[in-house]
Image (cartoon, rainbow, N blue to C red):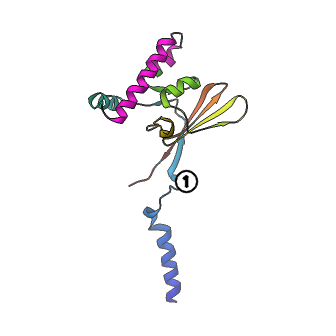
Amino acid sequence: MDKRILKIAFIVFLLSGCNYLREFPLYSEVYVEHPPKIQLFTQGLINSFTAYSDTENAKEYFRIKKRISDYLDKNKNLSGDITVALENSEVILGMDKEQVALVLGLPTRKVLHDKTIELWIYEGDRSDIGERVWYYKWGKLKFENGTLKDIEVQHINIAK
């Protein structure tokens, strides 16, 4: 009889009490959203980069801003929405692959579904090729005929 009670108590403990020990999220803690844009830098980050320009993140910010500025100088005929998004270091629906790469860098993986649909997957760091995807660490971008049609971002909620 004591062993049976012990087994039941152990099972109840496992199901309710040791959730904090696991290192992977449960499905219920993961949610996916499809935002219309990705903003790479907030005003607070920009202010800190300006104040502390010798940090690696600040140097990356200034590199990104420089390559976007050079691109805008060469491409004066862009739509107003895309020009504003690039000036704000944002990725919006309707951009082409080159414009997205200017802001986010290259993806970790590319998956070609057919001749018209390509999926860019961002997972972690691209330091192996000199890119630092330090802000946009997880997501998928869906291109159709070379134009960004969908942004998918995964969030994990783990209460600590």
Residue nearer the viewer, 108 or 44: 108
Q: Is residue 77 above or below residue 46?
A: above
Q: How many marks?
A: 1
Q: x and y percent of residue 114 in the render?
A: 73, 33
Seen as rendered, the residue at the extreme top is: 77
Question: Residue 19 in magenta?
Answer: no
The dominant secondary structure in magenta is helix
Which residue shows up at 44% across the image and 25% down it?
Answer: 89
Which residue shows up at 32% across the image and 31% down it?
Answer: 44
- Magenta residues span 55-84
Can you identify the residue that label 1 sits on? 27
Q: Is residue 143 left or right of residue 92?
A: right
Give SS at disc 1: helix
Going by the numbered disc 1, the residue's amino acid type is: Tyr
Quadrant of res 111: top right
Which residue shows up at 47% across the image and 39% down it?
Answer: 127
Seen as rendered, the residue at the extreme bottom is: 1
Residue nearer the viewer, 52 or 54: 54
Could you tell me which quadrant the C terminus lies in?
bottom left
Q: x and y percent of residue 158 in the render?
A: 44, 53
Q: Is residue 64 above or below residue 126?
A: above
Q: Is residue 109 above or below residue 158?
A: above
Q: Is residue 106 above or below residue 82?
A: below
Seen as rendered, the residue at the extreme left is: 51
